Image (tube, rainbow, N blue to C red):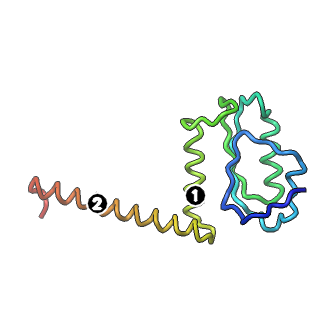
Amino acid sequence: SAKYKGPRPDALILCNCWAPSALMRPKNMDSLVGLPILVVIAGKDPIVPLHLQIKLANTLKKLGFKVTVCQFPSISHTVNVCEQGSAIRNFMLELVREGGGNERLHHIQVQRQAAEEKEEMRQAGVKKNFEKAFGLSP
């Protein structure tokens, strides 16, 4: 069985994947329990059969990972940003929203909130200037 020696990753994104059972039993499993993993399943993959992709997702769930599964029935052995991009984006945004106690994710969350507040202020200023220019403001 494998032993991951680096720092715990924030999350994993697996596209069109399978794994031999020997890789699915890391010795340091306690440190990986609850790790968010997005499993992107391609329904028409000629290289990694659908049943192996589903088996991987189910095994990861049984091992205690926090697994999100997105299936794309018309995708082959590739990443199609037009079809799969929103699922990957939403997964990443959810990680940032949750923060998970991770300093790096918390920093990203703070930056995102600051950017949203700045954009709201900008839009309010644009509206105020528009209303002023057309005599619509009180």
Foreground pick, 128 / 89: 89
Image quadrant containing the C terminus: bottom left
Residue 66, quarter of picture: bottom right
Q: Secondary structure at mark 1?
A: helix
Residue 58 located left or right of residue 107: right
Label 2 crowd bin: few (<14), some (14–19), many (20+), radius 10 Å: few
Instruction: Name the residue located 59 percent from the left edge and 65 percent from the top edge.
Output: 98
Q: Residues within 10 Å of mark 1 (few under 14, many from 20)?
A: few
Between 15 and 98, the residue placed more toward the observer is: 15
Quarter occupied by residue 7: bottom right
Q: Is residue 30 above or below residue 74?
A: below
Name the N-terminal-most of marks 1 and 2. 1
Q: Which residue is mark 1?
A: 94
Residue 123: % across, % down: 28, 57
- Quarter placement of the N terminus: bottom right
Identify the residue at horizontal 59%, vertical 45% (top origin).
Answer: 87
Q: Position of residue 79 (x, y in %)?
A: 63, 37
Badge number at residue 114 = none
**Residue 86, percent across and down?**
55, 44
Residue visible at 28% across and 60% down in the picture: 122
The residue at the far front in this view is 5
Q: Which mark is residue 122?
A: 2
Depicted 67 relative to depicted 75: above or below = below
Give the percent coordinates (x, y) of residue 107: 52, 68
In the picture shown, does residue 48 fall above or below 89? above
Q: Distance from label 1 to label 2 (Cα)?
A: 25 Å
Question: Circle 2 — which element?
Answer: helix
Amino acid tagged 2: Arg
